[in-house]
Amino acid sequence: TYSTEFRIDTANLVIKQGYTIREACEATGVGPTAIRRWVTQLRQEFEGITPSANAITPEQKRIQELEAQIKKIEWEKDIL
């Protein structure tokens, strides 16, 4: 597995620095499928879309944590 920072940096090679997927693969040694997934996820998170998988940006991670807390509170409320 790769660190969150590495995934963000790799996706930003494509998003912000204009690398192609192939160039990013050669630069990092990561396969194209993983890089495409990271690029797609990072673009979505920049647009404010919370992913169903683990988020990679700090903002979306926080949103996921808060959603989990809300779900737990609602579950506890239903029990009462």
Image (cartoon, rainbow, N blue to C red):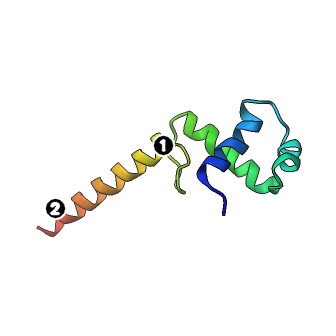
Work out which residue is located at the far bottom of the displayed protein and give it: 79
Q: Locate residue 7, reporting x and y percent.
A: 66, 49
Query: Which quadrant holds the C terminus?
Result: bottom left
Residue sitting at x 70%, y 51%: 37
Looking at the rendered structure, the secondary structure element under dot 1 is helix
Considering only order in the chain, which callout, 1 or 2, is on the residue closer to the N terminus?
Answer: 1
Q: Locate residue 5, reporting x and y percent.
A: 61, 47
Picture disc at residue 33: none
Picture disc at residue 58: 1
Query: Which quadrant holds the N terminus?
Result: bottom right
The three-letter code of the residue at mark 1 reads Pro
Q: Report crowding for label 1: few under 14, some 14 to 19, many 20 or more residues within 10 A (C-alpha).
A: few
State the separation of the CA atoms marked 2 and 1. 29 Å
Looking at the rendered structure, the secondary structure element under dot 2 is helix
Residue sitting at x 52%, y 55%: 52
The three-letter code of the residue at mark 2 reads Lys
Residue sitting at x 53%, y 50%: 55
Q: Which residue is mark 2?
A: 77
